[in-house]
Amino acid sequence: MLIKGYDVGPLVAGESLLARLGFWSNYLLSMCSDGGCAERPVPEWFGEDGADADALSEVLFDPERWPVFRMPAADGPGAVVIYRNLDGDYGTDYLLTHPGRSCVEQIASWDGDLSGTGLTWRELIRIADSPSFAADGVHDTAIRLLLLLPLLTDSDVPETATARITAVLAVAGAPQVTASIAAEHLPAHLTRRSRHDPSWASPLSGS
């Protein structure tokens, strides 16, 4: 797979991995700690267990195959998530695709925490809710939102966000009870490290 503007790594389509047990534990579990939580996040929050997470981590972090998750949008920018499996430099890169451009724009990376611009809740929803069915990638709006969630750098998340995250986690296979627990902790951690300044130009503008 080739992505113009991202010229490193043996990229492979990763969308089939989204249905595998252990994916969401690998992708979101480390983001469930808000610093003051008495409960230790566990894979069971996502309907998985430690064995599921360990088994899939061998696939997700394979240096010979870097999974790519594409989120094409019907209106405006889309997004791409890439597992950057360089030896000694493992992380996740977040890219935007812009209409009329052939090259992607990298806006952030996750290496234990987010570095880069990030997006507001409204911007996340805009990408998640506008899939393009004319292009290959992730079309389910719930799964798109979960993939985009690590980019959240908004200190003004609406009260309805927790309910929506709970609902999309349930779609991804999390039990209802633990989905609500994870949904409370994810925004708490992500917005606590918020660096979004309302005066910044949105990366969705292409500026």
Image (cartoon, grey):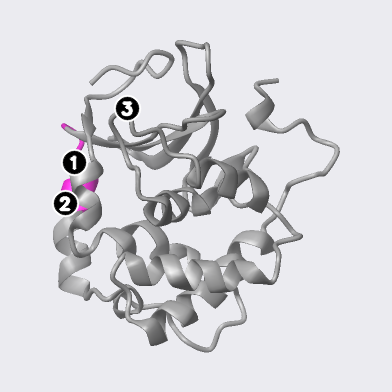
Residue 106 in percent (x, y) is at 52, 27
Asked whether residue 157 is drawn in magenta, I would say no
Asked whether residue 61 is drawn in magenta, I would say yes
Label 2 belongs to which residue?
58
The residue at 65%/30% (across/down) is: 203
Nearer to us of marks 2 and 3 is 3
Find residue 161 and report its image quarter.
bottom right
Q: Is residue 57 above or below residue 89?
A: below
The residue tagged with tag 3: helix, strand or loop? Answer: loop
Residue 135: numbered disc:
3
Q: Is residue 61 visible?
A: no
The mark nearer the N terminus, 1 or 3, is: 1
Residue 74 in percent (x, y) is at 47, 30
The mark nearer the N terminus, 2 or 3, is: 2
Find residue 25 and report its image quarter.
bottom left
Amino acid beneath label 2: Glu
Q: Nearer the viewer, residue 202 or 57?
A: 202
User: Which residue is the extreme one toward the right?
Assistant: 199
Measure the alpha-carbon separation of dots 1 and 3: 26 Å
Q: Magenta residues, as a range? A: 57-64
- Tell me if 5 is positioned left or right of 62 in this view: right
Contact between marks 1 and 2 (CB within 8 A): the answer is: yes
Q: Is residue 2 above or below residue 48?
A: above
- Tell me if 55 is positioned left or right of 60 in this view: left
Residue 172 in percent (x, y) is at 32, 64
The residue at 34%/34% (across/down) is: 133
Label 1 belongs to which residue?
62
